[in-house]
Structure formats: structure tokens, C-alpha cells
Image (cartoon, rainbow, N blue to C red):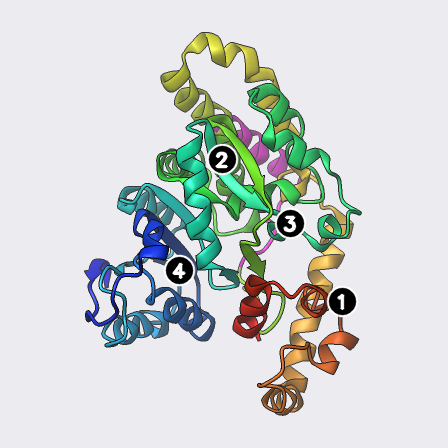
Amino acid sequence: MKDKYLRPGLTLSTSNHLSNLQTISIVCMTKDRPKEFANVIKYWRNYPVEFIISDGSETRLTEECVRIESKKIKCHPNFVVKYCRESNFPARFKWMSEELTREFVAFNNDDDFLYAPNANKLIDKFREDDSVTGIYSWRNFSKEYVSRKGKLLVSKALSEADIKTRLSGSLDKNRNLPDAVWLSILRSESVKRAMHDAFLASRQEFRDDRLSLNVLSIAFIMSNLLSGRFIESDLCLFFKRSFDVTADWTMKSPIMSEEELAIRVGKLRQGTYETLKSSFSSEFGLNTWQEIKSDVLRNLMQCQAYEFGESIDHISFWRRATEKSSIVLRSRLSPFIRREKDSLLKSVKPSSLSLLSLKWFRWDSWMKLHRAKCCRAAFDYLR
């Protein structure tokens, strides 16, 4: 099922207080996580959004889920589904950039939860200020940022109107800025351009590994950074799922000699730079590009946070290994965990196992303290 448009049944009436959601596209990128994906589509079919699914699965389980859920009776009358199954990442980015038709965009991948009522409220802020490219919230960031242990430079850089100032605070090793950019409500025109830039930057040297995927991320994030400033909201938006999701083990770091890897990294960086230059110059002019080109190049040379360099960050590698180990542990304990969850269905408190495992359940402790509607909804959803 490729490039297929599906329109579900019409039963739910349009709700005026959520009317802004008629102007937003929800992009869901998924791969071989049909159970997790099912939660996402079940949530969004209750709202008048354009739901765009970019599926990289090796099986047809997710495609079958789309077919079944799209035919449900209880769907919003203005809920629209667009689906494409494609294994090649650059091709997926190109397809998504062509399919966006709404004014605003948000990513709700299969391992995230985006709170719809707050997304609806923030669209009014876009209409108040045309210079804003994206709106993020503190919830988009890592637990280090929430606890104020992370760098605050990122949020300050994002809010600056000056492009050079924004670039100077980007791509730090805490990964706060990538989370803030990816997990934001964004203008569709900026996302389309950023996706196409990512496609152009990666198509020549793309391979099925982390290095290539990070080229897509870098081109996407930097293209959005060049488009306009971001502003922070005190409304909770995104909630990162840190449990009950099977990791994708297929994307490996490239196995090459140091010399070969250095050559490949150089080509990827150069391709990304030329793409950003072409895109930015055509929109803002070559003279404006001359003012920021050194900052863009410096950012590309400092992309260690994305494993975009010749050496591996051992701390990041250890963190990834720990996360994967936790998934294995969870799978072994799943029968016990399921029984405990069933007994807690009427409670909004985190389970005792979660409280004892905060290393892996990093948001549950916050759920216990922060009783906002969005946090309670996210806790129920992610549980």
C-alpha cells in the first residue's frame, strides 16, 4: 500500500475548541512496532488532523493496522490518513515533504506521545508572530534539562531572532536542541524544505546505518534552525516513551577503517553543507549566506552528538548499551509487570517497579509530582 489515501467513517462531530487541529499534519515515522503504532493511530483518529504514516517496516503488520483502524466507525469526520511503506530513508523524507498539505506539522512517532489539546492551543501563537518557526516545551527535553542539570544555552539560542546566535548554541552533547527541534509544533513550509534538504544531503552517500540516519537529522534540524526562531511554551507537549518499546537493532555504526570512515564523513558533511547553502541562498540570498556560512560549517564539523564523526563517543555508546539491556530485562520480567499493571489500572500513580527502576522509567517519578492533565494523559497512554 503505497501513496494511498484512506478516509474513515464519519461519526464524531467537529469540536469547536479543537478547531485549530484542522490545520495540522501529524507525521508518524514507524518501523516494525505495530503494537506501539496502533496506540498512536487510535489516539489521533479522534481528531481532525492529517495523519501521515511513513512506514519502514519489513513486515506488513503495520500496514494491516492502518487498514483496520482507518475503517473504524468512531473517527473524526475530518481525520485523513496518508500511508507509504518504504525502506529507504531518503525516499521516505522526500515522500513526506510532498504529502504535507496542512499549515502546521508535528511528529508523533511510534515511541512518543503528543498531547493534542495543548498542540491545539499553541497554534494561536503561530498566528500572532510570523517569525516563529517552531514552538517547543520543556517536556521535549531530556531529564537532565527538566532537572536543570543540562545546559540552558540551548533554549536561549533557539529563542534568538538572529541566525548566527541560534547556530552558536546548537548541537550540544546533551542532545537538547535536537529534541527541541524534532519535537515541536512546526510550520509546514519549513518542514517541507527541511525534509527535502535532508533528502538531497543524504542520497549520494546514504547507507543503512546510524551515520547516514544522522545526516538526515542534521540536515533537517539545521534547515529548521536557519528558517526562523523557536519559542518555548509552558504547556506540556511531547512525552518521550522510555519503556514498552522494542529497540531497532538494525542500524549499526559503520565498520570501516579510520581512513575510509574519514573520507565518507567528509563527503557527507560536504553534501550537507552544499545542500543547506543552495536552499538558504535561494530563499534569503547569497550575501546573507556569506554571513553565516562559517557558523554552518563549524556546526557540521562538531556533530559528535550525532555520531557524525570519526570517533565513537564511549559515553553515548554505554548509554545505548544500557538502554538495550533494559529492554532485554523488561522482556524477561514482562509477565510479572503485566500483572502489576493490571492491578493499577484505576490508579494514576506509577507502579512500584517503575519507581525502583527510574534509570529506565525516567518520567514516572515526575508523573507522581506533576498532576497536570497532559501529564496524567501521557502516563495513562504510555503505560
Secondary structure mainly formed by the magenta segment = helix
The disc placed on residue 56 is 4
Tell me: 138 left or right of 122.
right
Q: Residue furthest top?
A: 287
* Mark 4 touches mark 1? (CB < 8 Å): no
Q: Earlier in the sequence, mark 2 or mark 4?
A: 4
Residue occupying the point 76% across, 75% down: 355
* Residue 150 visible somewhere in the drawing: yes
Q: Position of residue 252 (x, y in %)?
A: 58, 56
Disc number placed over residue 141 in the picture, else none: 3
Residue hosting label 1: 359
Q: Amino acid at mark 4?
A: Gly
Q: Position of residue 359 (x, y in %)?
A: 76, 67
* For residue 13, side relative to residue 382 (left or right): left
Provide the secondary structure element on which disc 3 rests: loop
Q: Position of residue 282 (x, y in %)?
A: 36, 17
Q: Earlier in the sequence, mark 3 or mark 1?
A: 3
Question: In the image, what residue occupies the spot 23% across and 74% down?
Answer: 71
The image quarter containing residue 260 is top right
Looking at the image, residue 66 lies above or below residue 102: below
Which region is colored magenta?
A: 251-271
Q: Quadrant of the C terminus?
A: bottom right
Q: Which residue is mark 2?
A: 219
Q: 373 or 72, which lies in front?
A: 373
Q: Is the Cβ of the residue at disc 2 closer than 8 Å to that at disc 1?
A: no
